[in-house]
Every structure is written in structure tokens, then in C-alpha cells.
Image (tube, rainbow, N blue to C red):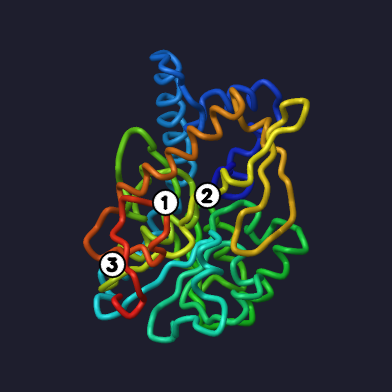
Amino acid sequence: MKQSSGFGDLDWVTRNKVLRRLSVMTSTQTNPNYSVSHLISIKLRVLIEYIVRTIYSFKFNRNALRPIKKLEGSRSEVKAIILANGPSVSRLLSGTNKPDLKNFDLFVVNFFPLSDLGSTLLPKAIVLSDPLTHPLSNTEKNRKLWKWIHCHENLEIFVPTSWFNYMKQSEFASRCIYFDDRTLVGWTKNISPIKARGYGSLTSYKALAIAYFLGYQRIGILGFDNTMFRAVHTNPQNRVFQGSHYFYDEKVDLDVTDSLNIGISDYFYDTANSFAYLRFFKKSNIYNLDNQSLVDTITKIQDLRDF
């Protein structure tokens, strides 16, 4: 399941058993099951969290967003491709007949660069928002990611404004471009990266929102499969496990039971929402490069040459 954005940003909630349970019950990933009172509690939680984050970021948010505001609409002569982590990436970009991507600005997300395929590509930008990719996340995988970023000096680094106070003191300060990662899911359909978003916390969607804001002539998406449900399973104790279903195989089963209020029902409710959020991105210059994709709200093309 998706995690909140930022690093250490309201994470004290998860350390308190009662607050953690309340957080799960009022998450936008939770199925309200036709209960009006439950739906109201979810929407109120979104609004309260937005207010808290707004107060927290008041002193630095405006300064943090200046770089991205200057870039609005600046890339109208260029085409971009957003590479997420779905299995379609491997199907379309691997092998002897893989397309030539050198004429496009490539956006990648999270740990994409550490994959075998990612190591062969030279992206224009990387978009990060998962707490596990914050520089303070002390895992071997994350250390490798930031070592890779360090070695690619021309790479643009898009990160949430909640990372501003840390990143401005880091070696990456001059390369960081910040976006607003507050959320108002259920209150707005906004996709602009300089305002609170109206869609769920998927880093690939944030990358798409950023590319659209930058004004690319055409934007192709690949790996936006939303097919993690094909690797979900339960054990005899009815614990819910998420298996890996990326274009690379991590061979890890993650126990997501505690992030679900009513089990598998919440899981598929959240999955349905992931497809629904893409309706906010139904724009004339956005194309799905995977013509077998389950995503049915974005125009598909048969061949990259048509893009």
C-alpha cells in the first residue's frame, strides 16, 4: 500500500497504537462501505491533515516552489516519457527491438535507476516522494540510489516541499526542484504540482503532473499498469500479502494487513481509486505507450513511432 509523503512528516502518528488505528480507519485508501459517517470522517481527516501540513510548511513553502514556478510551460518544444515501475516497461523496452529513447526527456521514479534496465538509460529527471527514498532513510538500497544520483550531475531532482529544510543543506541543493505534496483528495481534482493534489500518493502520478505542468509537447506514459493486485494473496491466518509485480522482481512479499481497515476490501478499493485518479490526467497531449494496459482513460498508441 502507499505511504505518506515526506520523511518524519507526521510519522509520530504511526508510533502510537491508537492514533495508528485511527489513521488507518480514516485513510483515503479505506472503503467507507456506503457509510456516510465514515466517508465524512475520511474527508475531515484529509482537511485536518492539509491544515496541519499547511501550517508546518508556511515558512518555507513559497520559497521552495519558486524554481518549479519558473519552469511552468517552458518545455513545449520537447516530448517526454514517464517511466513508472509496472511490468509493461520490461515488455516494451527490453530485448533486441527496444525503441530508441534518446530524443525524449525521460522521467523516472523512486528506485527505477537501480534496476538492470534503469542502468542503461540516461533520464532527464527523477521524481521522489516515497519516505524510503529520502536521503535520511538509512538502507543499503537507498544509499545506492543517492550514490547513483550523485554520479549523474545533470539530473533534475524533483522532491516534495516537505524535504526542503533538509535538502537545502545537502550537496544536492542546487539540483532540487520542489513540488507541493500536500493532499486534498476528495476535495479537489487538482493536478498542478504547485498546489495540493487531488489524487492519491503515487510517485509516478506526481511525475506525470510535473511533466504536464512543464508544458511538454507530448507526454508518453509507460509502466502505469496498476496491476499489483495480480500478486496479492492471503495466508491461512487471513493476513494480506503484497508480492512484487514490478518490471523487476524483488522477490519480496510485504505484509500489508495492518494498513488495511477491513482487509482485502480496502485493498481493491484503493486499487480502483488508482485507476480513477488517472481520469484527472485525461489530457489531449498525454498518451499511453502500452496498448495492452488496463488503464482505459488515456489514449493508447500502437507504436512509439506514432508518438
Determine the residue positioned at 44% across, 82% down: 101
Position of residue 7 in the picture relative to residue 288 (left or right) = right
Res 77 → quadrant: bottom left
Instruction: Give the mark, 1 or 3, whose residue is nearer the N terminus.
Output: 3
Residue 269, horizontal then vertical, whole percent:
48, 32
Q: Nearer the viewer, mark 2 or mark 3?
A: 2
- Local secondary structure at mark 1: loop
Q: Say which quarter of the image contains residue 14.
A: top right
Amino acid type, mark 3: Glu
In this view, the residue in front, 270 or 97, is 97
Pointer 3 residue:
72
Residue at position x 55%, y 57% in the image: 165
- Residue annotated with mark 2: 227
Q: Residues within 10 Å of mark 2 (few under 14, many from 20)?
A: some
Tell me the SS state at disc 2: loop
Q: Which mark is residue 294?
A: 1
Q: Which residue is depicted at the point 48% across and 73% down?
A: 125
Left or right of 206 on screen, residue 109: right
- Residues 256 and 194: in front is 256
> Residue 227's x, y, as percent?
52, 49
For label 1, count other residues whose C-alpha is less than 10 Å away and answer few (under 14), some (14-19) or many (20+): few
